[in-house]
Image (cartoon, rainbow, N blue to C red):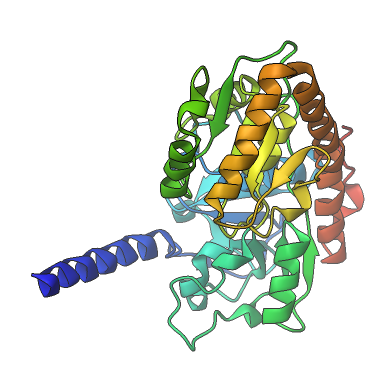
Amino acid sequence: MASGRGAAISLAHRLSERRALRTRRPPALRTAGSSPSPTIYYLCPDHAPPSGGIRAIYRHVDILNDAGLSAAVLHHSEGFSCRWFEHSTRTLGAPSVVLSRDDVLVVPEIYGPFLRRLPREPRLVAFSQNAYLTFEHIAPPLRPPYELFEAALTVSPDSAEYLRFAFPGLEVAIVANAIDTAVFHPLDRAPGKRLALMPRKRPAEAEEVLRLLGNRLRGWEVERIDGVGEAEAAAMLRSAPIFLALGRREGFGLPVAEAMASGCFTVGFPAFGGRELFDPSFSTAVEDGDVLAAALGLAEAMERYSSSPDEVRALGARAADWVAREYSLARQAEALLGFYAELGWPASRASAPTA
């Protein structure tokens, strides 16, 4: 019986691995000569559900086009475009695009197992939004061929340090994520007793923390944010004074930054790349996976909010102000355009948009 269960688990693992690899296989890409109008293409999977990484790709392309450069999101299929957030981003399908040696192809780290399939004609740039995915689905001792890349973009000092250690000599630039404060901002009045969380990365730990809280949740509503669009997620975060961070091996910690921008007092796991966000003056970081510490931190924050809501709201407002300042769209644009200028791209015409 035990061996049968083991075989079933092994089969399920292999099937899961195959499904994951399918999403990491790049589309067929054609190349030919040079181009009179070079373009920066961001390769992007046809992934319809909400994904912060894909949102970041679209934002990069918007910044470049707004600055007068030619850029596009390059999806696998003709006509595919994300619908879970508002945008007018230029998107193209791989079947209709012919890459030239003058173009730049920006490749997310998720394509790591299949990097050798990339064409050599365009200039290749890695875009690692989570360096902890670099070796995922690549059997040891094999390594992804990052020597193909002219340079790498990443979103945090943590991921930059990882990449520089793994690939000595690789030029790595940090372009921090931006939080759009027109979307993510605090409520103008005290929210109700709600605890928000995004359970997708750590559903078991999420449920364990809630069970540990037990009767302390009486009178509180738990907002599970999962599979909703950007505007709806922002509204749910605004409606909650406290957020439980459930990241795992993150390159940055976008949900935490969005929660803080929405005025939430945040308790939970920094998950490596998110450590830069957890200022102890307006948040509570706990050791990775320590569900008891997370529950204790939440219980304290909830009790504090019940007795002195304005005090907790003030901490949330401090977090929102800090995120708005440190992760502004203007700062992101300045860093991104500076990267392409260093790459020798014609960025002299580009100017960063104002905040």
Front residue of this view, candidates 71 and 101: 71
- Compared across the picture, whether 228 is left or right of 20 comes to right
Residue at 65% across, 49% down: 253
Is 65 situated left or right of 352 in this image? left
The residue lying toward the viewer, choosing from 157 and 353, is 157
Report the front residue among 337 and 214: 214
Residue 166's spot in the image, x, y percent?
67, 80
Pick out the residue farthest to the left.
1
Please state, as top left, top right, bottom left or bottom right, where the C terminus lies in the image. Answer: top right
Q: Quadrant of residue 318?
A: top right
Q: Quadrant of residue 235?
A: top right
Q: Is residue 126 above or below residue 47?
A: below
Between 23 and 73, the one lying in front of the other is 23
Residue farthest to the top? Answer: 189
Please provide percent x and percent y for residue 344.
84, 65
Q: In which quadrant of the rendered image does the N terminus lie?
A: bottom left
The residue lying at 80 percent from left, 52 percent from top is 336
Expressed as whole percent of the image width and height from the top left, the position of residue 193 reads 59, 18
Q: How many marks?
A: 0
Q: Is residue 88 visible?
A: no
Residue at 49%, 89% in the rendered image: 141
Question: Where is residue 240 drawn, in percent x and y?
Answer: 62, 23
